Image (spheres, rainbow, N blue to C red):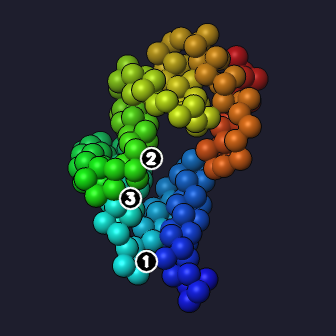
Amino acid sequence: RQAAEPANAFYQQGEMADEAARVCIDLGDLDAAARLYKQGHDLALKEPNIPAGRRDLWEYRYQHALARLAARRGDQAEARRQVAAARATLAQMQKDDAKLYQQQVGFFPYLEGYVAFYAGDYPTALADFQKDERHDPFIACMLGMTYEKLNQPAAARAAFEQAAKTRAHNPPAAFAIPFARKKLARH
């Protein structure tokens, strides 16, 4: 589709690479996730005459991914650096494309919570995850894991139950449903 619809083709290629990367990071294959996130970022930026807001989107998504990867690898300094970069890019997006900003701003609490969780700062992770209003099944799993770390088994169970009953058909749900069911079988 690159010849017929270059803007859409590059965007879709970036989306597909990012979705595959999401599966890899959730499964713990951080090297494959890093390669795919980079590929998605680079492909998307090939869009001809890419608007400033769309460029911001891909920078934000890549910084978001790099922060999560650094957090999973235990590199908290790099994770915090990427969170700060993502915050700055999000602010620029607000100026460049307010509508796109509104679509993306909801993903920021998840990022902060994710980084806090992997840093072992469970009270902060909990507060950040609770700010996420998207009702994402993956966030419900992260909440459940956070409640486990905070020794709150009833709250953990409730979060895993929420994740297990999702009807979504996307990579977060593909991870969340079996993960939550496995957790519930143990509670």
Q: Earlier in the sequence, mark 1 or mark 2?
A: 1
Q: Secondary structure at mark 3?
A: helix
Task: Determine whether the residue tagged by mark 2 lies in a helix, strand or loop.
Answer: helix
Between the C-alphas of marks 3 and 2, the distance is 10 Å
Label annotation for residue 57: 3
Position of the N terminus by quadrant:
bottom right
Q: Quadrant of the C terminus?
A: top right
Q: Position of residue 100 (x, y in %)?
A: 40, 53
Residue at x 66%, y 49% (from the top left corner): 170
Q: In the image, which is nearer the foreground, mark 3 or mark 2?
A: 2
Which of the two discs, 3 and 2, labels the residue nearer the N terminus? 3
Residue 139 sits in quarter: top right
Going by the numbered disc 1, the residue's amino acid type is Glu
Q: Residues within 10 Å of mark 2 (few under 14, many from 20)?
A: few
- Is 100 above or below relative to 180? below
Q: CA distance from mark 1 to mark 2?
A: 20 Å
Residue 86 seen in render: no
Instruction: Give the residue number, with chain letter if any, for mark 2.
Output: 103
Which of 153/171 is in front? 171
Would you name the residue on which mark 1 appears? 47
Q: Is residue 7 above or below residue 111?
A: below
Q: Amino acid at mark 3?
A: Leu
> Is the residue under label 2 in contact with that under label 3 (CB below 8 Å)?
no
The residue type indicated by label 2 comes to: Gln
User: Going by the image, does 115 lie left or right of 133?
Assistant: left
- Which class describes the residues within 10 Å of circle 3: few (<14), some (14-19), or many (20+)? many
Residue at (51% x, 70% y) in the render: 11
Does residue 60 lie above or below 168 as drawn?
below
